[in-house]
Image: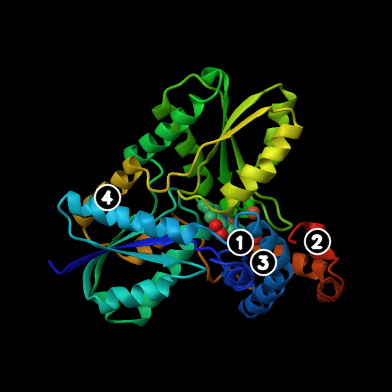
Amino acid sequence: MGRVGVLLLNLGGPDQIEDVRPFLFNLFSDPEIIRLPIKGLQKPLAWLISTLRAKKSQANYLQIGGGSPLRKITEAQAEALENRLTEIGKQVQVYIGMRYWHPFTEEAIAKIKQDNIRQLVILPLYPQFSISTSGSSFRIIEEMWKEDPTLRQIEYTLIPSWYNDPGYLQSMADLIAQELDQCSNPDQAHIFFSAHGVPQSYVEEAGDPYQREIEECTRLVMKTLNRPNQYTLAYQSRVGPVEWLKPYTEDALEELGSQGVKDIVVVPISFVSEHIETLQEIDIEYREIAEEAGIANFHRVPALNTHPVFINSLAQMVAKSLEEEPTTFDQVTHPVKNMKMYPQESWEWGMTTAAEVWNGRLAMLGFIGLIIELVSGQGPLHFVGLL
Ligand SMILES: C=CC1=C(C)c2cc3[nH]c(cc4nc(cc5[nH]c(cc1n2)c(C)c5CCC(=O)O)C(CCC(=O)O)=C4C)c(C)c3C=C
Ligand SMILES: [Fe+2]
Ligand SMILES: [Fe+2]
C-alpha cells in the first residue's frame, strides 16, 4: 500500500475584511448555491450580488473580529485528526480543501498529487449531506478527476455524510449536557436546534436529502442525550427572495417566547466549527430576538471544534473507510436516487418548473431594477432581503 491521505472538505471563510467581497463572489458563482438556468448569467450575477452584499456582510464579520475563524479551527481539527490516527496506528496525511476560500480544494488536490498519495479518504466536515455544501465540493472534485488521468490512479473512498455516527452523536450529547447543567433548572430548559437552512426547492424539486438527515440527526442526538427536555428544530440564515425550510429560527424563538419559555439552550446542528453564523447570527442577532420575546436565559452550546470524542469519531470513520472498496464519484454525487446536481439536461430555458420560476424571478427583478439598486443602494434586492 502506498501513501495514504485524508481530504477534509469545508466551506471556507474570509480570513480578513478585504477577503469578504471576493469570498462572496466565489460563493455566488457556485451553481449549487444560486441555481440559474443559463450558465452565462452566473458570473455577472455573482459579481453583482457580491458587490451589493459586501457591506452588510463585512459589518457582520467586523462584529466577530474582522474575519472568519474557520481556517484556524479547521487546521486545528486536521492536526488533531492526524495525531489521533497516528495513535491508532494509521500513518495518514490530512489535507484541507475549502470550497470558497483558502486553502482551496484545488490547492489541496495539487498537494495530494505532489505528495504521491495512493489512497485517499474524502471526508466533508458537514455531518449532513446537502447539494449546496458537500454536493458542491464533490462536484468540483469529480470535475478535476475527469480532467486528470494522474488523479484517476488514486484509489479513493468517500463518506457522503455521517449525521448518525455514534461517536459524533455522543460528542454532541456531551456538549449539550454540559450546557444544560449550567441552567438553574436543567430539565426545564428548552433545547433549540438551529440548523442552517436551504431553499425549499432543493428538497422538494431537487431531492436534497438534507432536511431528512437534519431531522433524523436531531432525533438521534436527543436519544443519545437521554434527558426529559422538550426540543424544537428550526432553520437559520435565510438569504434571498425564495422560501427556505421552515420554521425559521426567528419565528420559532418568538413562538417559544409567547408560550412563556424562559430558558433555552441553542444547539448549532449543521456545522462542526464556530463561524459567523454561530458567533454573530446566533450569539448576537438571535439572542436579541429571544430576549425581546421574553426568553430571559439564552444559552448556546459551543461548536464541536476539536472535542476529543468528536475527533476520535472522525478517526474511526477514516479507519473504517480505508478498509472499504474504492468507490466512484457517480455513486456518491448521487447518494439519493433522482437527486439533481448541476448541471443537468433539464436546466434549460422553459423546460422545467425550476427554470420557469427563474425566468419569472429574473423578469420580475429586471435588470433596470438592478441598475437602480447599484446606483442608489436601494431597490429590489433590498426589498427581497438579499442585501
Ligand atoms: C450546512 C451548512 C450550510 C448550508 C446548508 C449552506 C447553504 C447555503 N448558504 C448560502 C449563502 C451563504 N452562506 C454564507 C456563509 C456560510 N454558510 C455556511 C454553511 C452553510 N451554508 C457557513 C458555515 C458560512 C460561514 C463561513 C464563515 O465565514 O465562517 C454566506 C456568507 C455570509 C453572509 O453574507 O451572510 C452566504 C451568502 C446559500 C444561498 C445556501 C443554500 C443554497
Ligand atoms: Fe451558507
Ligand atoms: Fe447569515
Q: Kindly identify the residue that appears in the image at 57 percent across and 51 percent down.
A: 203
> Label for residue 382?
2
> Label for residue 355?
3
Mark 1–mark 4 Cα distance, whole angstroms, equals 32 Å
Q: What element carries label 1?
A: loop
Q: Is mark 2 within 8 Å of ligand 1?
A: no
> Label for residue 315?
4
Amino acid type, callout 3: Ala
Amino acid type, callout 1: Gly
Crowd band around label 3 with a 10 angstrom C-alpha radius: few (<14), some (14–19), many (20+): some
Q: Kindly identify the residue that appears in the image at 51 percent across and 25 percent down.
A: 182
Mark 3–mark 2 Cα distance, whole angstroms, equals 23 Å
Q: Which of marks 3 and 1 is in front?
A: 1
Q: Which of 196 and 364 is in front in this view?
A: 196
Q: Where is residue 51 in the image (x, y as percent from the top left)?
A: 71, 73
Q: Is mark 4 on a helix, strand or loop?
A: helix
**Left or right relative to 341: residue 276:** right
Dot 3 or dot 4, earlier in sequence: 4
Mark 2–mark 1 Cα distance, whole angstroms, equals 24 Å
Indicate whether 156 appears above or below 40.
Answer: above
Q: Nearer the viewer, mark 1 or mark 4?
A: 1
Dot 2 or dot 4, earlier in sequence: 4
Q: Do the residues labelled 3 and 1 touch (CB within 8 Å)?
A: no
Mark 3–mark 1 Cα distance, whole angstroms, equals 38 Å
Quadrant assignment for ligand 2: bottom right
Q: Where is residue 218 in the image (x, y as percent from the top left)?
A: 48, 35
Q: Kindly identify the residue that appears in the image at 57 percent across and 47 percent down.
A: 278
Residue under label 1, please give it.
66
Screen quadrant of the N terminus: bottom left
